[in-house]
Amino acid sequence: MKKKDLERFAARLRDEKAKVLNHSEKTKHEELTLSTDDLMDEVDLASSELNQSVALRLRDRERSLLHKIEIALAKIDAGKFGVCDSCEEPIELKRLEARPVAELCVRCKEAQELEEKLYA
Ligand SMILES: [Zn+2]
């Protein structure tokens, strides 16, 4: 991915993070201040955690989004942003534009959603 695009996504993610933090200021949690080391472990766990995020309440959704933003920012730092967690192919730029926290490419996302439908 071009450096210019990366910087643009980083700015969007930081902006998004600030918004979520602002919104959930009254419901602060220790988890919001994860260290970068923790986050790098979390990146490996990210795909399994996706499956758990189906029926979360609003505050949990915010925390979940924040978590994904942190992972995405950590990936930018690690030079791994925009790579599919599943097949390790680059995620479509258009998909990232619509959803910068996307962890899967369109193909893997569709496969995952199909699986969720079948086994939910
Ligand atoms: Zn993929």
Image (cartoon, grey):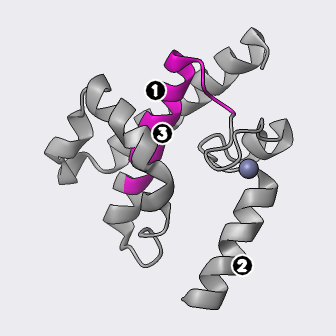
**Kind of residue indicated by mark 2:** Leu
Which residue is painted at 41% across and 70% down in the image?
A: 52
Which residue is painted at 67% across and 50% down in the image?
A: 104
Which residue is painted at 79% across and 46% down in the image?
A: 95
Residue that label 2 marks = 114
Q: Sequence order check: which comes first, mark 1 or mark 2?
A: 1
**Kind of residue indicated by mark 3:** Ile
Residue found farthest to the left = 30
- The picture places residue 12, in percent across and down from the top left corner, at 61, 29
Residue found farthest to the front = 87
Which residue is painted at 79% across and 55% down in the image?
A: 106
CA distance for labels 3 and 2:
25 Å
- Element assignment for label 1: helix
- On screen, 58 above or below 31? below
Residue that label 1 marks = 74
Q: Is residue 4 found left or right of 16 in the rendered image?
A: right
User: Comparing marks 1 and 3, which lies closer to the viewer?
Assistant: 1
Count of marks placed on residues: 3
Q: Say few, some or many: other residues with alpha carbon within 10 Å of mark 3 (under 14 / 14 to 19 / 20 or more).
A: many
Residue that label 3 marks = 69
Q: Quadrant of the N terminus?
A: top right
Q: Sequence order check: which comes first, mark 1 or mark 3?
A: 3
Where on the picture, by quarter, is residue 8?
A: top right
User: Comparing marks 1 and 2, which lies closer to the viewer?
Assistant: 2
Q: Is residue 45 found left or right of 10 in the rendered image?
A: left
Predominant SS of the magenta segment: helix
Task: Give 97 or 19, whichever is nearer the viewer.
Answer: 97
Is residue 66 rendered magenta in the image?
Answer: yes
The magenta segment: 64-82
CA distance for labels 1 and 3:
8 Å
- Element assignment for label 2: helix
| Picture disc at residue 13 | none
